[in-house]
Amino acid sequence: MSQKDSSGSSITNDGDVDFRAQQLFKLLVEQYIADGNPVASKALATLPGVGVSSATVRNVMGDLEALGLVSSPHTSAGKIPTQLGLRFFVDSLLSVEPWGSDKVREIEAELNPDLAPSELINAASQMLSRFTQMTCLVTTPMRNQVSLRHIEFLRLDESRVLVIMVMNDREVQNRVIHLEEEIAETELNQVANLVNREFAGRPLMQVREDILTSMQVDKDEMGQRMQQALDLASKAFETPAEAEQELVVSGEQRLLDFAADTDTVRLLFDAISKKGQVLNILDRCLRGQGVQLFIGQESGYQPLGEMSLVTASYQLNGELAGVLGVIGPTRMDYKDVIPVVDVTARVLSAAMRYGN
């Protein structure tokens, strides 16, 4: 960046930042990401390839501050990028290199298509947290994207039945249902055979609706005992609203490493445990293309006001299913974090499609 020393404005007539100012700003952001300290004009001027005096750097920083791209945390300190500045850096100045084949193979080895979907999601969450050293969040597929493959009813005693459901070929879910009236083992087997014959392959949410519809349509032809058994089957597919979508979290303790203060940590832990608002933010990411990035206040959620969230959606059987992402400091190394989130989402999608 060896350009002639000049004290002219760094802002073009169109209000844009000129090339020299962009390059100085890029160096400042990279230095700030590396060590987290304000960058002085004198230190910036001594970097290789700058080729201008510290006075010129100061003038440029003044122009950038007027645009809201940098600020001074203390009157005597150097400059740091603002959240607006980081957005400008990511959108206009950041060069993201594709991940090397060795790293991609490492991710593929961990996200083995032979694993069940829940195991894949847990593996992706733990791996992404380990690679980035940040907190990772992954939303599970909605129930309307999970299909029934097989169901069995096992009578435990006169008042309890164990329901065993196989979903998407390898996902197994067990639950115990309490009976109001005793149901014979033969009737349970009849219902299991009926459900497997008529409803296998359909989304779980649709199965329950179809069973209830069948009970209404055929109630005159169906005996009371069979009605009771089918009612039991419909209960097997009930899911509380709060359990419609889960949030798998890895590396929560890493929030302690980069949160500004204990109050922020407490708010973040509380937000993650309650899930609702975090799921809403991640749901917005589900509708976007490619990697989605929220820097600080862009999420519109106060606990994330000093954090960045980098996400990408993944697919199940070729359809959008959920979102994975990382929460970290706004000074995270975006050139490394963005590609690993992107590649992990792609490999997870391929594994889910292959195995299901």
Image (cartoon, rainbow, N blue to C red):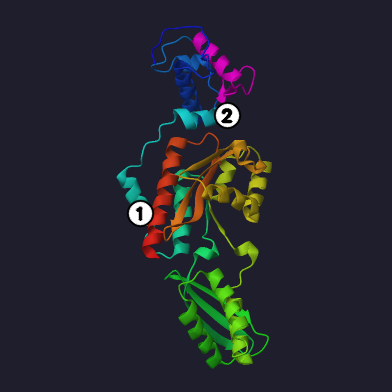
The kind of residue on which mark 2 rests is: Leu
Q: Is residue 219 magenta?
A: no
Q: Residue at x 51, y 19 (%)?
A: 16
Classed neighbour count for the residue bearing mark 1: other residues with Cα under 10 Å, few (<14), some (14–19), many (≥20): some
Q: Is residue 147 left or right of residue 304?
A: left
Q: Position of residue 132 (x, y in %)?
A: 46, 44
Q: Is residue 184 left or right of residue 25?
A: right
Is residue 150 shown to the viewer in this render? yes
Q: Position of residue 162 (x, y in %)?
A: 56, 81
- Check disc 2 and report its element: helix, strand or loop: helix
From the image, tell me which residue sits under label 1: 108
Is residue 136 shown to the viewer in this render? no
The kind of residue on which mark 1 rests is: Glu
From the image, tell me which residue sits under label 2: 84
Numbered circle sitting on residue 321: none
Q: Is residue 208 above or below residue 271?
A: below
Q: Residue at x 65, y 39 (%)?
A: 261
Classed neighbour count for the residue bearing mark 2: other residues with Cα under 10 Å, few (<14), some (14–19), many (≥20): some
Q: Is residue 72 magenta?
A: yes
- The boundaries of the magenta stretch are 54-82
Q: Quadrant of the C terminus?
A: bottom left
Q: Residue at x 40, y 32 (%)?
A: 95
Q: Position of residue 185 (x, y in %)?
A: 54, 91
- Check disc 1 and report its element: helix, strand or loop: helix
Residue at the limit of the structure toward the left, as seen here: 101
Q: Is residue 145 left or right of residue 157?
A: left
Check whether the beta carbons of the residues at disc 2 and disc 1 lie within 8 A of each other: no
